[in-house]
Amino acid sequence: MTWFVVVALLVVAAAGLLRWRRPAWYWLTFGVTLAALRILIHYGSVMDACGLTVPPPRWRMRLARMANRDMPGPRAPRILRIRPTRTGLVLRIKLRPGQDAFDVAASTDRLRHSFGLYGVSSRELRSGVVELRMTGYDVLKRVQMPAKTDLAPMRIPVALREDGAVHYRDYRAVPHALTLGATESGKSVYQRNLVAGLAPRDVALVGIDCKQGVELFPLGRRFSALADNPDTAAELLDALVMHMEDVYQLIRAHQRITADTPDAEIASDIWDLPEDLRPVPIVVLVDEVAELALFAGKAEEKRRDQIITALARLAQLGRAAGIYLEICAQRFGSELGKGITMLRAQLTGRTAHRVNDESSANMAFGDIAPDAVLAAIQIPTDAPGIAVTGDSSGGWARIRAPHTSLRQAVNLCNKYADRTPDLPALAPFRPSLGHLAPASAPAVESIPAAA
């Protein structure tokens, strides 16, 4: 008995230490089993306390009266499946007649408290079937991406959602996106994760960084074109528009619309073309769009109108030609001038890091997901990288990208520098960075002192 007590105390101490220092390990060793048992044992009473039960059917009540038995109690939604994950549990339930998925969604906070879990979110899979994703710990405190992810040609994992699922940037589903965030909010780290995820893919990267290139030019060996000032950016965007028009001419020449060709094989974008004819897709990253929209004179105003017009054309027409926009900004409102709101309306994907005021959050979510505005302005200053993401469907979620240093991103871009496509239309804007330094060389060359 003494040894049994000692072993039990050691197990409890180890579980407490793991829960404090390594919550992911604690969940996989102890937490998932305890949480599953707690849910299965208290499921009926919790659902009844949360108002997620319905009265028994009349025929059962009538049968109980005829048999002189106790009246049956209220019925909770039926459990279809409970599945453990690396961050929590997935509970799939079947609603009873008269119940609604919105009732379950409204009770997620009460379910989280009752089951003793960190977070609970719900979504309706089909009529009458709801999936509850439960997290056992704060997965955004220390982001650890899973080793295996669901990859596709233009679909990359960039962050982790608060329910433990992976957040993907799918360019074919959401061609253009806007990323907002104040200084030191994690916006640059999110952008590095995008570049790191795209570097090994067959895609051309085009960058516009008006901060004299300090963010994107270190990654230049993987970029097909770069611009570090508004004048060069205007010329680069015009070259992209001309490239887009050439791609459309290519699609028209190979549409295969003859009478003996099935409709399913008619080409309307680059992904319908044969692989040997398909142009390489292009992802355009704009580091700070406000620098392209501001002007101080007539000449700069003309250049500004040229840039915004080109961006709007790429946003409206670029998807079928395989041109996708990633626009970053601290603010993206109408004060930047005409054409800005039209451009913003074309950016389906929205991601907002910590912002300085509510109006900045409204610029991201006010027209698509008003509920996400409150979540965006509540992001604390001591949690860089946490963001709120949403799209035109109205759904939103809190995410956090894993920390990727600039050195890690540079090493990845250097590793896959040979995959950089050479596009003739963008050749004048190809960065010239010289040869790669040997692995033993220092990261930054020393500058000799002046004589």
Image (cartoon, helix red, strand yellow):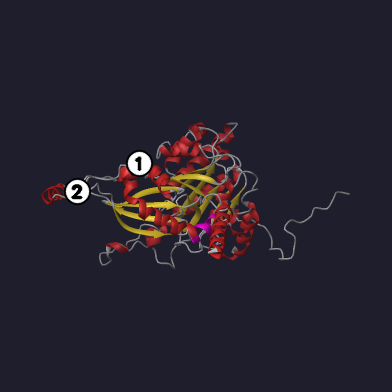
Q: Which one is in front, 273 or 412?
A: 412
* Mark before the other along the chain sequence, 2 or 1: 2
Q: Quadrant of residue 421?
A: bottom right
Q: Mark 1 points at which residue?
A: 106
The secondary structure type at the circle numbered 2 is: loop
Task: Report the residue at 56% width, 45% height from top.
Answer: 187
Residue holding disc 2: 70
Q: Position of residue 377 (x, y in %)?
A: 50, 36
Give the percent coordinates (x, y) of residue 132: 37, 51
* Few, some or many residues within 10 Å of mark 2 (<14, 14–19, 20+): few
Q: In this view, does 250 lie to the left or right of 417?
A: left
Residue 384 x %, y %: 58, 45
Residue drawn at x 40%, y 43% is 109
- Which circle, 2 or 1, is nearer the viewer? 2
386 shown above or below 261: above
SS at mark 1? Answer: helix
Q: Is residue 446 magenta?
A: no
- Left or right, residue 124 beside residue 304: left
The answer to whether one can see residue 132 in this image is yes
Question: Seen from this angle, which residue lies furthest left?
Answer: 66
Q: Is residue 27 magenta?
A: yes
Mark 1 surroundings within 10 Å by alpha-carbon count, few (fewer than 14), some (14 through 19), many (20 or more): few
**Badge number at residue 248:** none
**Magenta region:** 23-29
| 260 w.r.t. 447: above or below | below
Name the main secondary structure of what is drawn in magenta. helix
Q: Is residue 128 left or right of residue 118?
A: left
Mark 1 residue type? Ala
User: What's the residue type where badge 2 is placed?
Assistant: Asp
Image location (x, y in percent) of residue 36? 40, 57
Q: Can residue 350 be seen in this view?
A: no
Mark 2 touches mark 1? (CB < 8 Å)? no
